[in-house]
Amino acid sequence: MELATETVTHVKHWTDSLFSFRTSRPDSLRFRSGEFLMLGLIPGADKDAQQKPLMRAYSIASPEWSEELEFYSIKVPNGALTSQLQHVEPGDKILLKTKPVGTLLLDALLPGERLWLFATGTGIAPFAAILRDPETYRKYDKIIVTHTCREVAELNYGKHLIHSMQHDDTLLELLGKDSLDKLVYYPNTTREHSTNTGRITTLIRNKTVFSDLSLPGISPATDRAMICGSKEFNIEMRSLLEGFDLQEGSRSDPKQFVLEKAFIE
Ligand SMILES: Cc1cc2nc3c(=O)[nH]c(=O)nc-3n(C[C@H](O)[C@H](O)[C@H](O)COP(=O)(O)OP(=O)(O)OC[C@H]3O[C@@H](n4cnc5c(N)ncnc54)[C@H](O)[C@@H]3O)c2cc1C
């Protein structure tokens, strides 16, 4: 499989454990918003050594039309890749496998009125791509993105994303006039008090999210969903959505929801 060497163009540290970065985009790379690829580095200080690259799955946080690639990353304490990756700076090289894959695709969902994007932690990364894709706004009347983190500061990447989208005239022109009027952002925290405190699964079960957003609930006739979080979160969300009679789909068999793990436990 082709391994591309790309240049880091921008790095931003959001908290002690979260950062995002952008890289140049390989000419040969074609992907759909929501997909992930394998990203990595040559391990160790001596980059000239003929060592096997250390690669991990990463959601592409930039939309498919973007000239650069964006990634949003955790810094795992002593993590094999991220203990090195967190030190990248503009000008550094990273490795990419140019074969993106994934299940979080608009094509894997049947047409509907509302699209729910349920993320925890770095699981917002694929949705950062989907939220900047014009197709999302062509297909749905309302797009609701929920982002659950433990602490308020961990929401900053998502908050900044939504804010910057609202002030980016080039993006607004591309997405279509008034597109962002369809977008609803619902951040929530589990370990620190915020506007929406509690796990999203609890806020769905007790209907708080529906009353907060003046929505009737979730129904297979109108609602579609994508889930990206920890294994436990995905399992709980899947069961909740199935409780609303939604079914899991795929690109070859589109239905009402799809899910992807944000990381392997
Ligand atoms: C489909 C897919 C998409 C992914 N997309 C992203 C992404 O966009 N951003 C990202 O940061 N990671 C993502 N990951 C996780 C990523 O592949 C690596 O696990 C992560 O970069 C840590 O690598 P590491 O070698 O430092 O630690 P690893 O040895 O890979 O992980 C050590 C442990 O850290 C925990 N962990 C790993 N990643 C995360 C995470 N993102 N959030 C919380 N805990 C975690 C897990 O418990 C894991 O067992 C994705 C994983 C999958 C399967």
Image (cartoon, rainbow, N blue to C red):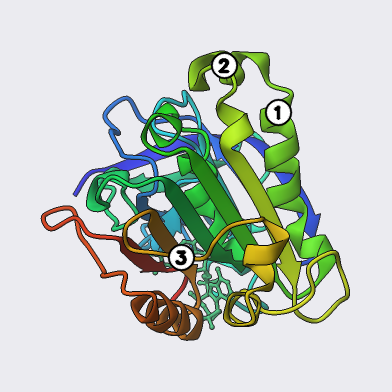
Circles 3 and 2: CB distance less than 8 Å?
Answer: no
- Residue type at mark 1 is Gln
Question: In the figure, 212 relative to 110: above or below?
Answer: below
Query: Residue at image x 66%, y 14%?
Result: 169
Q: Which residue is mark 1?
A: 166
- Residue type at mark 3 is Ile
How many numbered marks are there? 3
- Residue type at mark 2 is Lys
The 10 Å Cα crowd at callout 2, few under 14, some 14 to 19, many 20 or more, is few
Residue mark closest to the camera, 3 vs 2: 3
Spot occupied by residue 73 in the image (x, y as percentages of width and height): 60, 58
Residue mark closest to the camera, 1 vs 3: 3
Q: Which residue is mark 2?
A: 177
Q: Left or right of 36: which side holds 61?
A: right
Q: Nearer the viewer, residue 133 or 40?
A: 133
Q: Which residue is mark 3?
A: 218
The 10 Å Cα crowd at callout 3, few under 14, some 14 to 19, many 20 or more, is many
Q: Label 3 vs label 2: CA separation?
A: 27 Å
Query: Residue at image x 85%, y 64%?
Result: 195
Q: Element at badge 1?
A: helix
